[in-house]
Image: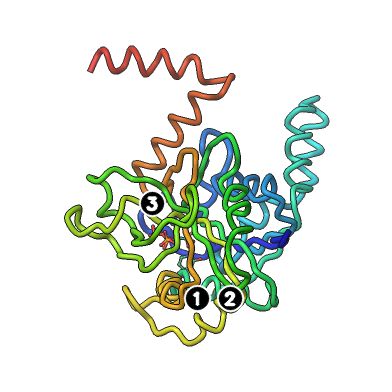
């Protein structure tokens, strides 16, 4: 088995869609009930066997790194109040995984953010998880992607795909491809935000990737694309031209928490599943919907 040990998490953007909430608070720390989205994403990486997380951050987003460091005064406070459950939870958080942080001083695009992790990744294939995407399912999304990775050539990449209804397809990057085996496709090209008539399939690319280290030289040569940014999609398009891009259709649910609607949906859906707030949230929603 080819072991993927490292995961890059780009988190250096300005999060403009959530302003003013994200003026001071990094969007990656916005909570789904009481867990920051980045924590959920890192937990998915750990459950999938990742041993080291490389967080791409910027100098103004130090709080993200601090979230995974110990906080002696808070821990002493919880201990003195006998709040052992919370104390244990915080301690687990700091021992979850090795988190290394690299800087992207200016947000020049997602492709550039991944390129900033070049030294930290080295010569091995690696995973990328976008903290804008959270997933739930019987098996973690990245774990499923890693299993599918066993079927593809060494120097190829694989991206997670999600089956999207036709009326929402215009929001996503959509693949054109051919079937390799159950849930696995060879990607011929990615069409950005197609109209329903022009969509080549109903498979949208979501923010989970396994990339060969060759992606770095492709990104180094990449010219700024949409919005003047170095786009990861352009690097993936190059891999697709070389027939080195595969897509795996993820089994589970995807929430695009980088959008306001997706963020609210994730809070409701994951809140309903919680034993502490779920039952009351359900009866609130039922009576609220009856009244409105
Ligand atoms: P987004 O484009 O969704 O994030 O990038 P953003 O720019 O922060 O948010 P909006 O669109 O203005 O609301 C997806 C992920 O890639 C990171 C972001 O932090 C986010 O987690 N990213 C994006 C970088 O790390 N660097 C960049 O230059 C761009």
Check whether the beta carbons of the residues at disc 1 and disc 3 lie within 8 A of each other.
no
**Nearest to the observer: residue 1 or residue 197:** 1
Q: Which residue lies furthest to the left in this view?
A: 197
Does 111 sit above or below residue 91? below
Check whether the beta carbons of the residues at disc 1 and disc 2 lie within 8 A of each other.
yes
Work out how far the residue at label 1 is from the one at label 2, CA to CA, in angstroms.
Answer: 6 Å
- x and y, in percent, of residue 270 in the image: 50, 31
Mark identifier at residue 112:
1
- x and y, in percent, of residue 49 in the image: 71, 51
- Which quadrant would the C terminus be assigned to in this image? top left
Instruction: Select label 3 or label 2 by which is in front.
Output: 2
**Nearest to the observer: residue 30 or residue 217:** 217
Label 1 lies in ligand 1 vicinity (Cβ under 8 Å): yes
First in sequence: mark 1 vs mark 3:
3
For label 1, the crowd category at 10 Å Cα-Cα, with few meaning under 14, some 14 to 19 and many 20 or more, is many
Mark identifier at residue 18:
3
Residue at image coords 39%, 60%: 178
* Relative horizontal placement of residue 263, taking residue 80 as reference (left or right): left
First in sequence: mark 3 vs mark 2:
3
Label 3 lies in ligand 1 vicinity (Cβ under 8 Å): yes
Residue at image coords 49%, 46%: 250
* Mark 2 lies on residue: 116
Residue at image coords 45%, 19%: 281
For label 3, the SS is helix
């Amino acid at each position: 088995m080819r072991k993927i040990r490292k995961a890059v998490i780009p988190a250096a953007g300005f999060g403009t869609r959530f302003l003013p909430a994200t003026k001071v608070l990094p969007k990656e720390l916005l909570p789904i009930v009481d867990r920051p989205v980045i924590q959920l994403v890192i937990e998915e990486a750990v459950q999938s066997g990742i041993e080291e997380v490389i967080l791409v951050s910027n100098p103004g987003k130090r709080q993200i790194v601090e979230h995974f460091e110990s906080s002696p005064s808070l821990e002493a406070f919880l201990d003195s109040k006998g709040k052992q459950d919370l104390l244990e939870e915080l301690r687990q958080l700091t021992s979850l995984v090795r988190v290394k942080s690299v800087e992207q001083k200016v947000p020049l695009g997602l492709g550039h953010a991944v390129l900033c992790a070049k030294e930290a990744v080295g010569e091995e294939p690696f995973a990328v998880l976008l903290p804008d995407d959270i997933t739930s399912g019987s098996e973690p999304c990245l774990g499923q992607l890693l299993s599918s990775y066993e079927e593809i050539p060494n120097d190829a990449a694989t991206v997670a795909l999600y089956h999207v209804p036709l009326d929402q397809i215009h929001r996503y990057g959509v693949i054109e491809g051919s079937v390799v085996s159950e849930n696995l496709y060879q990607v011929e090209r990615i069409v950005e935000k197609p109209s329903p008539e022009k969509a080549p399939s109903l498979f949208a690319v979501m923010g989970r990737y396994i990339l060969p280290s060759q992606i770095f030289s492709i990104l180094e040569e990449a010219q700024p694309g949409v919005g003047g940014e170095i786009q990861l999609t352009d690097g993936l398009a190059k891999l697709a031209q070389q027939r080195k891009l595969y897509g795996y259709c993820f089994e589970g649910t995807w929430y695009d928490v980088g959008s306001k609607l997706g963020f609210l949906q994730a809070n409701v859906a994951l809140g309903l599943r919680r034993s502490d707030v779920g039952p009351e949230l359900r009866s609130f929603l039922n009576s609220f919907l009856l009244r409105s």
